[in-house]
Image: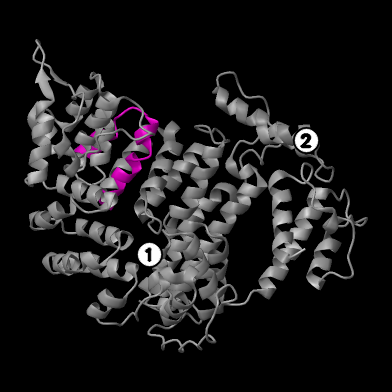
Amino acid sequence: MSNAQLWAALQQSAMVGSDRLAVPPALASGVDPSASGSQQAVQAALQPRTDVAGDSPAQQLLRASAVAAVFERAGWQPGALVRLTAPLAVPAAAPAESRTAPADARLHTLMGDVLKDGPFELQASMLRTLDQAGQRLPHDLLVPALEQGRQSVELRQWLAPVLGERGRWLGALNPQWGYASGVEETADPELVWQEGSVEQRVALLRSERATDAAKARTRLEGSLKELGAKERLPLVQALAVGLGMDDEPLLEKLLSDRSKEIRENAAQMLSCLPDSAHSQRVMGWMQSMLQQDDKGQWIVEPPEEGLKEWERDGITLKPDAYHRGGKKAWLLEQMVQLTPVSFWTRALGLTPLEVMEWSRRSDWKSSLRQGWVQALQYQLDVEWIDAAQTMGRDMRHDALLPALMARLSREERESRWIAQFERDRHKLIDAIEGMSQSLGGAELLSPALSARLTEALHLAVGGKQITGNWHSYRADQALLSCARMLDVTALERFAELWRKPSVLDAQPEPEPEPQTEPAAAATVTATAATAAAVAAPASIPLTPQQQARLERSRVRPWDEERMRGHLERIVDLRLGLHQAFVALRGPA
């Protein structure tokens, strides 16, 4: 049996299940002395073991797969799958580093831990802080860092600046790390544009758009014909920085691009320019769908069929397979998505909040609202974003609403979050979820909001009486989000939630509460007593029934040891990284 056949046999059995498809007898019947050493090792791993309790065919299969995987990795040779006409050339040495790496051994260890096990937000924040300090990753952390970047496209924007010259050199040598290859960090902008990675060129274009939009536009326009669609898309999206009417001719041209994604992006950017010819055409079509009834109320009535000329302006006439609703709803939603939101307040004579209320009475409410939420992903209008937050819950647009908040300034976002969780403390988990979803990967809450949120948590779940449902999966995720996004100045106070002696722990045999006390307090006391009774004595293993009762008795997320461990790890890592980076920067 060849090695390829061996792997196929193991994989087929694993996919179907060892109880339904056993491995071939040639592998499982015993060790064949005439077979190769690697196959003998796999055969040995498939044999039942008396020293392993309950050794099953499934365990034997997994054991054999692990052995085979080790042999495969050990025997891999670069270029072995390619017919080489000549020996591989020795690669040129990596360029000299332009940045230094931190020398602090403790920081080195902490960064390795974060790169290995995350979470993502902590990885992004760490890499951004390292970049802000003008440092790079140590060489022995490059491989795990490059692997993380291979698995997470979103992480690359923070990873690329701190890879250093050796990291970019490694990226050029391994196709799986090709995203990291590029020119030296100190290279001339023209060299970056001609030879840099896509990420480097996007960064250059965005930087130039912020300072000289015309120069960046000319640079992009001159290179579009030479680029593939995958390269063109992120570069075209960079035009959103400093977008203005001077960009209209290029965007109009891109409406005829061969890539559907680029055509869609061009149409959305043109919708941000109400005076553009594209927006004028779309608003004209939208106006034709509006009419007043006998009572003078505005109603919208989409057509049965779309016009052929709509397609060039970004409206697909045939509904997608995933679309819920008929063709008229499909056409209306797309038209609304490409209509400048200012059209609605002008055409209806209403404020954004009143327009949202008007849509509630429309037969096309869902299509209108979904279109507005999509439009606001590109068009920045604070009044409209506030109005969108008042919509009832809908799975189709719930996922998009946090992205709207992300478009506001930090001060605008946080003032709205504070109002939300102070208005209804029973919905603190909802507020935390919204904050987490609106923040970028490396972004944190301000010190002021972090302090207020921490105190709100102490009031809601840190005392004897709990406000809200804090023994659920959502509560667990909300607490973990807080550990990741609170400013470091609030972390020690946040950790007091589980580190300080609990009110319940201080009263192992609580007296019955008076009848006038709220029911929630009695429930907390009863469940705590149940937990204590079930868990004692600690030396006796719990039965499944007792374990289930213990889970049900959990009052707070950190009552579960695993959850407490997750919280402790994130807080300790963040505090440790902060102290190490402060030492790295030196005295102010």
Give the x, y percent position of residue 50: 93, 55
Q: Amino acid at mark 1?
A: Gln
Q: Tell me the tag on residue 544.
A: 2
SS at circle 1: helix
Instruction: Residue 360: say if magenta.
Output: no
Nearer to us in this view, 111 or 255: 255
284 left or right of 193 in image? left
Residue stretch rendered in magenta on the structure: 384-410
Q: Nearer the viewer, mark 2 or mark 1?
A: 1
148 left or right of 38 in image? left
| Residue in the image at 11% along x and 32% along y | 285
Q: Earlier in the sequence, mark 2 or mark 1?
A: 1
Q: Which residue is disc 1 drawn over?
A: 157
Q: Amino acid at mark 2?
A: Pro
327 left or right of 291 in image? right
Name the residue furthest top: 294
Instruction: For residue 422, say whether it is visible.
Output: no
Give the x, y percent position of residue 193: 26, 74
Instruction: Residue 408: say if magenta.
Output: yes
Figure quadrant of the N terminus:
bottom right
Give the x, y percent position of residue 217: 15, 64
Q: Would you call the spot at circle 1 few (<14 residues within 10 Å), some (14-19), or many (20 or more)?
A: some
Instruction: For residue 187, say whether it is visible.
Output: yes
